[in-house]
Image (tube, rainbow, N blue to C red):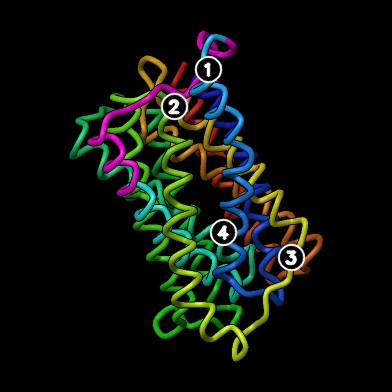
Amino acid sequence: MWIILAFISALLLGSYEVFKKVSLKDNAVIPVILVSILVSCLILTPFLFLSEFFPDTIKNSIYFVPRVDLHAHLLFILKAFIVLTSWLFAYFGLKHLPISLASPIKATQPMWTVVGALLIFGEKLNGYQVAGIGITLVSFFLFSVVGKKEGISLKTNKWFWYIVMATLTGALSGLFDKYLMKRYEVMSVQVYYTFYQAIIMGIITIFLWAPTRKKTTPFKFKWAIAFISLFLVTADFVYFYALTLPDSMISIVSTIRRSGVIVPFFYGAIVMHDKNIKLKIYDLIGVLIGMYLLYLGSK
């Protein structure tokens, strides 16, 4: 079951990447992130309200938000900081790089998550899973190599390194998720850390973006920003829930989750008319083979 949920989360996450790219076109990055988080808070607020004031209405459902202690809130604040760090790097990188290149680079995140999972959680992989992860990560790496053919210097292009930093911090977030899911309910993590994100991002917007907003790219509201929130909230809920199921493995879930790269890939090829699509298709086939091997290994 958790494998199926991981694939659903992957498709939702891929759609989320497309809406990010659309939202960032000729738009200011920081307020786009803030507005998307505020919309996410708007989506999640009814569940928190019902849980606090009318608990009997949803107490026995997966949408109930249990109360947590101060220590948990501190962990959720830390989670919010880690995720926002990853997002800031990722959004700036995605704005300035082709989506068919930036998204696959970000998708190398499972490599670091797998290393962390093996070292920290002691997870063990069978032959199919090892082969699947290996093929997938090689394919993801070859995507980044194609960037050289598009005139993007991987050594000097700062936007490339923004994506790398987004990938590393994203992997750290994935490992932290596994820790949190063993101790707290899915909705508690998702709701509270999202609200803390809004507070932190609000402070960043006021002190970093607002003072220089007239000198930089102006902010324009686009409905695509709302869809960023809708698809992300749904993808994260499915992802968190998958991690709570027995025998779920963060290394496998994270790798499958990144297979959603096929969605922005086809968007870049068909809508954005990105370059070197034929070469990228070969790499994409490798990703799909890797995903199939992961599926076989989980049966």
Residue at x 37%, y 14% (from the top left corner): 246
Mark 3 sits on what residue? 221
Q: Earlier in the sequence, mark 1 or mark 4?
A: 1
Residue 187 falls within the magenta-colored stretch: no
Q: CA distance from mark 2 to mark 3?
A: 30 Å
Which of discs 1 and 4 lies nearer the camera? The answer is 1
- Of all residues, the one furthest to the front in this rendering is 53
Residue type highlighted by circle 4 = Ser
Mark 4 sits on what residue? 103
Where 278 falls versus 47 (above or below)? below
Q: CA distance from mark 4 to mark 2?
A: 26 Å
Mark 1 sits on what residue? 62
Q: Between residues 251 and 291, which one lies in front from this camera angle?
A: 251
Q: Earlier in the sequence, mark 2 or mark 1?
A: 1
Do labels 2 and 3 touch, CB within 8 Å? no
Residue type highlighted by circle 2 = Val
User: Could you tell whether 62 is left or right of 280 in the image?
Assistant: left
User: Could you tell whether 298 is left or right of 39 in the image?
Assistant: left
Which of discs 4 and 2 lies nearer the camera? The answer is 2
Residue type highlighted by circle 3 = Phe
x%, y% of residue 76? 34, 42
Give the number of the disc on residue 186: 2
Mark 1: which secondary structure? loop
Do labels 3 and 4 touch, CB within 8 Å? no
Residue type highlighted by circle 1 = Ile
Q: Between residues 46 and 162, which one lies in front from this camera angle?
A: 46
Q: Between residues 109 and 192, which one lies in front from this camera angle?
A: 192
Do labels 2 and 1 touch, CB within 8 Å? yes
